[in-house]
Image: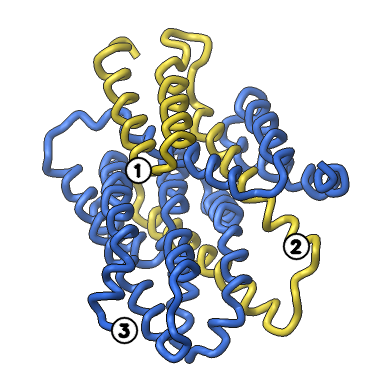
Chain colours: A yellow, B blue
């Protein structure tokens, strides 16, 4: 991977991450944010996160063996563990290890 | 408040950031990106899900503009954190910029859930933020270095990103007051995954979600 591409990506990500954190201190120093802004801030994050789940799955070949089964199993494990125990690391760890075993040892022609 | 008692407050974050940082570092090394970029990313970006997302975008050779839009939208939730800390941080000196910079989900949770006497707040908040960031940097560098030197079949490690998104979706769903946006985004994500061109899927789906959210504000709020 080209290092100037990586550096440019890091710079833009750094600046914009900081921007998202400083915005309220610039715009709402003296006034309350509008109801619409609050509404968007309340609801957008969950929508972004759900869409990112599908984004992470966009290159799965659903029509060919093994039909994304490993991904589905991994997601069900991560989701159900998290609903039950609310421990993010446990959910991520178990789901990832299961997925790695599945694609390395079970669906070998993957 | 002694340094040690501040350190004790950050132990839950330590337990979370070291392994998650390591997963980030391993993923980075798997993309054949040199380990020191893990250090720079954790030093300058310092956003858990955000850094994973940047790696995913690097892997699919996204443009710099796409990286910018995606990370901005993902981290917009931090704006909300800042909003609820306005009055506290207003009283701090210029050093507050480091606290604002370091306002990750976990740091925010720590600052919000611990009671600190007003006159000690600036110092305690600064130390908490710096400790948290140091755990994140250490974890990610360990992961990136290990990924290069320990021979191990890391195929599939990228699923940690998918699992992280699943976990954060559930957390945010539990926290949000309305459930319709959650269901709508499942539909949009599903359609986007199947129908949108792969390289524009993220931008198109996120824009669609924002448009639906604004157009149907009334209907969504009533539910």
Secondary element under disc 3, as helix, strand or loop, is loop
Q: Residues within 10 Å of mark 2 (few under 14, many from 20)?
A: few
Image coordinates of residue A106 in percent, x first then y, are 29, 12
Residue B114 found in image quarter = bottom left
Position of residue A48 relative to residue B71, above or below, is above
Q: What distance separates the C-alpha of mark 1 from that of mark 2? A: 32 Å
Toward which corner of the image does residue A87 lie, by quadrant? Answer: top left
Residue B60 percent location from the top left of the image = 46, 38
Q: CA distance from mark 3 to mark 1?
A: 30 Å
Residue at 59% across, 58% down = B77
Tell me the distance, in whole angstroms, between the alpha carbons under discs 3 and 2. Answer: 37 Å
Disc 2 chain ID? A
- Point out residue A83 in the picture as x, y percentages from the top left corner: 49, 35
- Would you say B200 lies left or right of B58 here? right
Please name the residue that numbered disc 1 is placed on: A89
- Which residue lies at the image location 50% right of the left edge and 44% below the top edge? B168
Q: What residue is pinned by disc 2?
A: A37
**Residue contact at pointers 1 and 2, CB within 8 angstroms:** no
Q: Nearer the viewer, mark 3 or mark 2?
A: 3
Residue designated by label 3: B1
């Amino acid at each position: 991977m080209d290092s100037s591409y990586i550096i440019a990506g890091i710079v833009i990500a750094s600046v914009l991450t900081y921007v998202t954190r400083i915005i309220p201190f610039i715009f709402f120093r003296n006034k309350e944010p509008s109801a619409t802004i609050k509404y968007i801030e309340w609801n957008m994050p969950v929508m972004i996160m759900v869409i990112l789940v599908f984004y992470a799955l966009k290159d799965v070949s659903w029509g060919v063996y093994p039909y994304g089964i490993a991904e589905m199993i991994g997601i069900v494990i991560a989701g159900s563990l998290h609903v039950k125990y609310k421990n993010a690391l446990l959910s991520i760890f178990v789901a990832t290890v299961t997925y790695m075993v599945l694609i390395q040892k079970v669906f070998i022609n993957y | 408040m002694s340094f040690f008692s501040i350190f004790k407050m950050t132990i839950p974050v330590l337990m979370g950031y070291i392994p998650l940082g390591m997963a980030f570092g391993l993923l980075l090394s798997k993309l054949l990106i040199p380990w020191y970029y893990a250090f720079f990313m954790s030093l300058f970006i310092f956003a858990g899900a955000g850094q994973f997302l940047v790696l995913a975008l690097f892997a699919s050779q996204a443009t710099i503009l796409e990286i910018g839009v995606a990370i901005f939208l993902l981290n917009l939730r931090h704006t909300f954190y800042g909003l609820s800390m306005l009055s506290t941080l207003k009283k701090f000196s210029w050093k507050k910029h480091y606290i604002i910079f370091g306002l990750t989900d976990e740091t925010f949770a720590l600052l919000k859930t611990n009671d600190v006497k007003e006159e000690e707040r600036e110092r305690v908040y600064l130390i908490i933020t710096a400790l948290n960031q140091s755990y994140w940097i250490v974890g990610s560098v360990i992961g990136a270095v290990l990924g290069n030197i320990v021979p191990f079949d890391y195929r599939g490690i990228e699923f940690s990103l998918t699992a992280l998104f699943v976990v954060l979706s559930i957390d945010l769903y539990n926290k949000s007051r309305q459930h319709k946006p959650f269901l709508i985004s499942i539909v949009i994500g599903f359609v986007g995954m199947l129908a949108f061109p792969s390289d524009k899927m993220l931008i198109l789906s996120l824009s669609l979600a924002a448009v639906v959210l604004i157009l149907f504000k009334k209907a969504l709020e009533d539910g």
